[in-house]
Image: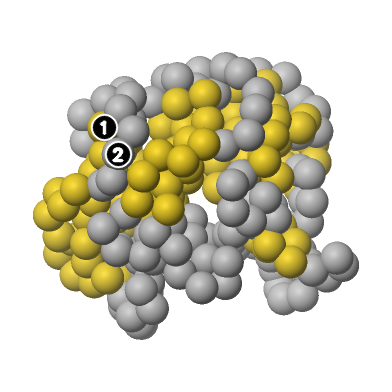
Amino acid sequence: RYGNAALASATRAVWAGGVNPTPTYFNTIDAVEIMSTGNAFDFGDLYANVYYPGGVSNRTRGIYAGGYQAPSPAGFKNNIGYITISSKGDSQDFGDLITAKNSFSTFNSPTRGCFAGGATPSKINSIEYVTIATTGNASDFGDLTVARNYAGGCGSAIRGLVGGGSDPSANNTIDYVTISAMGNAQDFGDLTSARQEIGSCSSATRGVFAGAWAPS
């Protein structure tokens, strides 16, 4: 399936939601142990059958948010659900996003998770955040420099990045924010090419944006 959301601890990677093929939508949560090889195993179920939700995590807790639910009742979701990554089980209610949306970018520090941009279905530039260790509704963080969805997100303990996306044409902008301080994003630089639906990951020091549509 595609259009799912990924998050991880130091030892386990977890994926949730997605679609394959249209119109079969999933609430499935899958997991693997990163240090070993083998097939994914069933972790539990997400709050709804959604595609393009977003995921953030610290070493112990994973948080999924938003997405588009189908087939019934169809619509954009504002749900936020959490899991304990080391144990299997269904997502539990965390709170709500300010705006029901999907296809947004995510990044996090060990304490704060951020959800940037997305579609409602119109493109939006808002950034929302939650404190991962607590429960509650998302709060306003600031705005991206460009309203877009399908961008990649990555981060360190200090800084979050959002690269590329659709505005609605493919975009090469990289924005950054300081995760511990609220405020609007600033220009970081540009990707080597404008593209959307981009894959992304990061270590504590380096962020990587890979693949995508541009439009091929």
The amino acid type found where label 2 is placed reads: Gly
Q: Residue at x 70, y 55 (%)?
A: 77
Which is nearer the eye, 43 or 131?
131
The picture places residue 160, in percent across and down from the top left corner, at 30, 38
Q: Quadrant of residue 32?
A: top right
The picture places residue 56, in percent across and down from the top left corner, at 51, 35
Is residue 20 shown left or right of residue 117? right
The picture places residue 189, in percent across and down from the top left corner, at 12, 54
| Residue 41 in view here | no
Q: Residue at x 24, y 51 (%)?
A: 175
Q: Which residue is mark 1?
A: 178
Which label sits in the foreground, 1 or 2? 2
The amino acid type found where label 1 is placed reads: Thr
The picture places residue 31, in percent across and down from the top left corner, at 65, 36
Can you say whether 28 is above or below 81 in the image? below
Is residue 29 shown left or right of residue 8? right
Secondary structure at numbered mark 1:
strand
Q: Which residue is mark 2?
A: 183
Quadrant in which the N terminus appears? bottom right
Q: Earlier in the sequence, mark 1 or mark 2?
A: 1
